[in-house]
Amino acid sequence: MATFELYRRSTIGMCLTETLDEMVSSGVLSPELAIQVLVQFDKSMTEALESQVRSKVSIKGHLHTYRFCDNVWTFIVQDALLKSEDFAENVGHMKIVACDSKLLTQ
């Protein structure tokens, strides 16, 4: 899995992919242009996260599963407590997918 696919598996990424697929199927858009749109989406998400996200969150909980594959870490945390300056919230379980940001610019 390419590291950019992390963004594509988000809700906004899946909706964009569905819309582009429909446009290619109906002949409104060429497959090449649809791929260019997805590549630009990946770059835009990376830039936005690097430049606009400044808050920090701490996570405490029980680490159920972790794995490292293709330079991507995946953590499953149960009984997680998320804390920031503004809030603290308990969640049942959460999945964290993390990769080296240097890989995203290659």
Image (cartoon, rainbow, N blue to C red):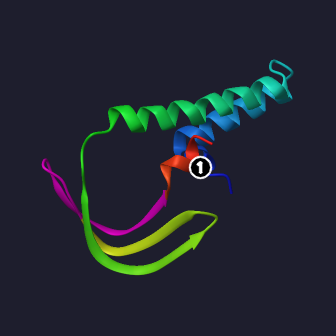
Residue at 43% across, 32% down: 48
Kind of residue at disc 1? Arg
Q: Is 28 above or below relative to 92?
A: above
Residue 74, percent across and down? 50, 68
- The quadrant the N terminus occupies is bottom right
Segment colored magenta: 82-98
Say whether residue 42 is left or right of residue 47. Answer: right
Q: Secondary structure at mark 1?
A: loop
Residue 98, percent across and down? 47, 59
Residue 54, percent across and down? 27, 40
Q: Is residue 95 magenta?
A: yes
Q: Main secondary structure of the magenta part?
A: strand
Say whether residue 10 is left or right of residue 78. Answer: right
Residue at 28% across, 75% down: 61
Work out which residue is located at the far top of the displayed protein and give it.
28
Residue at 57% across, 49% down: 103
Q: Is 3 above or below relative to 78?
A: above
